[in-house]
């Protein structure tokens, strides 16, 4: 009752063989995972710097105070 059957041991051996067997498969998987995280962080950093570098656009109407931004964002048929 306390010991595992042959099927349990075969599954455990198969999992160990997949994780640690042959040419460092686990290290390759973890290396690819780390590269993905680094690429994600780099992309987030690029987005933050791009947003900081480009100031918001101000049109002549908005700076003169003649139209509110909400009125110019909606199509003409939606304005009431």
Image (cartoon, rainbow, N blue to C red):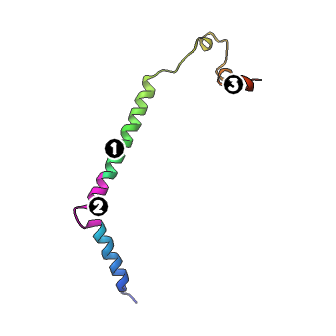
Image coordinates of residue 68 in percent, x first then y, are 66, 18
- Report the disc number at residue 75: 3
Check the picture and name the quadrant holding the N terminus: bottom left
Write down the region rendered in magenta: 19-31
Image coordinates of residue 23 in percent, x first then y, are 22, 62
Q: Secondary structure at mark 2?
A: helix
How packed mark 2 is, by other alpha carbons closer than 10 Å (few <14, some 14-19, many 20 or more), is some
- Report the disc number at residue 38: 1
Q: Quadrant of residue 62?
A: top right
Residue drawn at x 39%, y 37% as measured from the top left: 43
Rendered position, 76 above or below 61: below
Image coordinates of residue 65 in percent, x first then y, are 65, 12
Q: Secondary structure at mark 3?
A: loop
Q: Give the prevailing secondary structure in the magenta stretch.
A: helix
Mark 2 vs mark 3, CA separation in Å: 55 Å
Residue drawn at x 44%, y 26% as measured from the top left: 52
- Report the disc number at residue 26: 2
Residue drawn at x 74%, y 25% as measured from the top left: 77
Mark closest to the chain's N terminus, 3 or 1:
1
Please give the count of numbered marks on the rendered protein: 3
Mark 3 vs mark 1, CA separation in Å: 42 Å
How packed mark 3 is, by other alpha carbons closer than 10 Å (few <14, some 14-19, many 20 or more), is few
């Amino acid at each position: 009752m306390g010991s595992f059957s042959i099927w349990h041991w075969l599954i455990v051996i198969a999992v160990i063989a997949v994780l640690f067997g042959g040419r460092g498969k686990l290290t390759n998987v973890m290396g690819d995972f780390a590269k993905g995280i680094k690429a994600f962080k780099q992309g987030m950093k690029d987005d933050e710097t791009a947003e900081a570098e480009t100031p918001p656009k101000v049109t002549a109407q908005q700076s003169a105070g003649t139209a509110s931004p909400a009125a110019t964002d909606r199509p003409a048929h939606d304005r009431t």
